[in-house]
Image (cartoon, coloured by chain):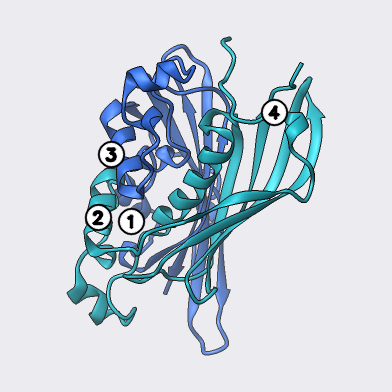
Amino acid sequence: MSKVPTKIYFEDVQVGDEIPKLVTAPVTHLQLVRYAGASGDFNPLHTDPKIGEMIGTGGIIAHGMLIMGFVGQMLSDYIGPQALKKFGVRFKGMTHLDDEITCTGTITEKYEENGEGRIAGKVQAADQTGDIKVTGTFVAALPHRS
Amino acid sequence: MFDTSKIGQSFPPFTIEVARCKIHELALAIGDTNPIYHNQQEAQAAGYADTPLFPTSPTVFGLWGITEMLGHLVSLGINVMRILHGEEEYEYLAPIYPNDVLTGVVTVAEGKSRQGKNGSSMDIITLEALYTNQHGQQVLKSRETIVVRN
């Protein structure tokens, strides 16, 4: 099996390290339409303002998976997509148009498994007021520097 | 009330061909401009065998991306207009690349009903999917929890 490209080595990471944060541009209606097409989730809750008003969410709300995607982008920037072994989130709150999402994360564990270096961490995404949208965890395999 | 006799039930397998343009399109919608997702040559120059999946690309394979999945949920007695997404988790078992042909099997892993104080109820259902590639190798597990407000 070919070696997975890495941006960072196991030795470079310490428990307690903060992952470089990602701050997104304000969420727009166009972005939700584009995300609907990209993901295949065409629920009108995310795309049709009339439905948003009808069901009392205060207009359309973003796909939870878009917010997980922002967190995914932060992890991809940090370690590269193929270092990820596990990535999971819990959806905590609704994201509205014009919200600006900040993704952050911290390394919580460092260990060896099957001769590979592993790191584990916790992640979250919150809006400009600090309201939490998702929380989650990940595990990644990182190569040794030698 | 969720019919707990459905726990353990699997839906018929489905097949997906991994498309390069869907990786590009998803990263674009999220706003990730990293060239490894948008250009095959750039991905290879960065050391990848081919365009890698974006971390949340499996969403395109799963519940929200497969139209027949909605029919399966209806068969469980679920009102699909009342679904909220509770949790999503991926376990990446091996690299997946464009043109791979994946076979997915979705199983009802857990299901329970909860009563609210005001007499309302909700069902909490966890669906697990296991994906195998064209070489018979298991490449991905996903786990998705949905909440249905009754």
Q: Which chain: cyan?
A: A
Q: Earlier in the sequence, mark 2 or mark 4?
A: 4
Marks 3 and 4, how far apart at CA:
30 Å
x and y, in percent, of residue A79 in the image: 59, 35
Q: Is residue A35 above or below residue A59?
A: above
Which residue in the protein does label 4 denote? A9
Q: Nearer the viewer, residue A54 or A80?
A: A80
Foreground: disc 2 or disc 4? 4
* Picture quadrant where residue A39 is located: top left
Circles 1 and 4, Cβ within 8 Å, touching? The answer is no
Q: Which chain: blue?
A: B
Marks 1 and 3, how far apart at CA:
29 Å
Report the residue at 78% width, 42% height from top: A14
Marks 3 and 2, how far apart at CA:
15 Å
The mark found on residue A42 in the picture is 2
Q: Amino acid at mark 4?
A: Tyr
The mark found on residue B25 in the picture is 3
Q: Is residue A56 above or below residue B128?
A: below
Task: Sort mark 1 into few (<14), some (14-19) or many (20+) by Cα contacts within 10 Å.
Answer: few
Which residue in the protein does label 1 denote? B74
